[in-house]
Image: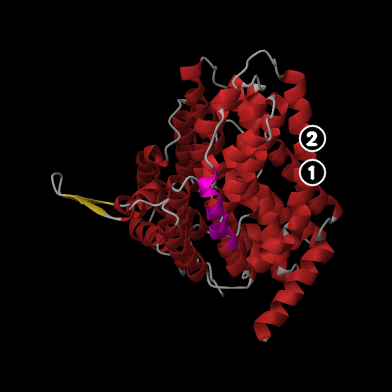
Amino acid sequence: MDIQVAEPQNAVPLTFYGGLWGAILPFVVFVSGVIFIALSGAPDERGFWPVLLLALGIGLLLARNRHQFSEAVIEGMSQRIVMIMITAWILASTIGVLMTITGFVEALTWLAAQLHLGGAGFVVGTFVICCVVSLSTGSSFATILICAPILYPAGGLLGAHLPTLAGAIIGGATFGDFFAPISDTTIASALSQKAAIGAAVRSRLKYILPAAMVALPAYYVSATLGGSGLLTGGEALQGDPRGLPMLLVPALIITLFLRGKHLLEGLLLGLLFGVILGLLLGLLPLQQLFSLDLANFTAKSFVIDGINRATGISFFTILLMGLVATLKASGLINRLVNLAGARSQTPQHAEAWIAATAGASVLLTTHSVVAILMVAEFANKTGERLGIPAIRRANLLSLVVCVFPFLLPYFIPVILMANTTNAGEAFGIPPVAPLQAGLFNFIAWGLAGMTILAVVFGYGQKGDQQASTISLLKEKD
């Protein structure tokens, strides 16, 4: 699919009172507000809506041409790829709800229970379970919200080292965020760089497998050294095997994407197959599929729940893309492209610039997808000029944006992980702090190492080049 990431087409750059600082000030307000809200323990994206509107209002007051500012915001919000991402969030969230109500996590938990895992073994099992769930749902948020309330208390009762246990949960969520075909970062990085999703996913094995091979023993060693082994709670972990056949749903979706099917086709077919399978197995009650609450004049459905779950991130992204568009309209991105063009004389230099700008963008926007879209045009122009393949550019973007948000304590995934550990309080198990949850996310540390290897030493260049060549040949056929 050929996706163009449009930039506001203004003949004259958008200027601000205060020059460059006037253009950046709305982002300073936004980031400050996000950090304050997140560290206050409220990582729901809906809480960021007022902050974004405030930032847009400040930008409007600072803009010398308010009509031009307004047009840039609307054009940024209405980009085609923004609608693609919202569609992906809606369908992926709905699939995530379906997997939850059909007992998918309970089935994986049952498998762990059959292995009679101790504290350290349970931490490793938790990591594997969360990897499967994140690969199935494509959502780090959904993985944390689904798995943490079940696995954190159970692991705590088994005497697992709690920071390592929390790190295993968010580590599994990170795994899917980087590697799942239906992950928002996978979709945004691939389509923004005009790369096929299936080909991009296959090419990421060489990055995610080494990171996982380092993370697995790291979780075991950390849990062994830190676990008390004093508590016993084997009965707390039971589960139910009936939901195991639901593994066929993510298997189908992944197969469709690997075969190059359209995003909408893969997600819709996966959802329809999951509904039919759930009904046939008796795992999906008809009232969960659709029912009417006549007393309250409302309809109920897991589809409605899935769409509601995607509402927060969708409107957050729309508003943030409007704010990002004002920075692009100011000409800052073009200046960055020109600067990189002057400084980048080799593909390795260009890759370093792409990684650096992606890192700066994710720190500035606190949003992985928006960070990718913010630098997409820059990555395209710089990469194409020096012959960096589309899949290579997409992988670099995903590597960078899957590190900071899962390590630093003011990003939503880390705050969300820390908040969900409150589920253990009913069992006398203390929560962990955001800093601890991020610190023990060994997958994110592994991806940070892979990013350094890729940018500094050129790791994966030949494989990404071959993957891009094969993908182009298939498109021509």
Q: Residues within 10 Å of mark 1 (few under 14, many from 20)?
A: few
Classify mark 1: helix, strand or loop.
Answer: helix
Name the residue type under label 1. Met
User: In this view of the protein, which residue sits in the foreground, 317 or 377?
Assistant: 317
Dot 1 corresponds to which residue?
213
Query: In the rendering, which numbered label is found on residue 434?
Result: none
Residue 437 counted in the magenta span: no
* Quarter of the C terminus within the rendering: bottom right
Which residue sits furthest bottom?
477
Tell me residue 196's x, y (percent): 63, 70
Residue 246 counted in the magenta span: yes
Tell me residue 426's x, y (percent): 46, 18
User: Residue 461 sits in which quadrant?
Assistant: bottom right
Classify mark 2: helix, strand or loop.
Answer: helix
Name the residue type under label 2. Pro
Dot 2 corresponds to which residue?
217
- Residue 334 in sight from this viewpoint: no
The reply to whether discs 2 and 1 touch (Cβ–Cβ < 8 Å) is: yes
Tell me residue 91's x, y (percent): 44, 59
| Residue drawn at 46 percent across, 27 percent down | 41
Q: State which region is magenta.
A: 241-251
For the stretch drawn in magenta, the main secondary structure is: helix
Q: In this view, does 137 lie above or below 159?
A: below
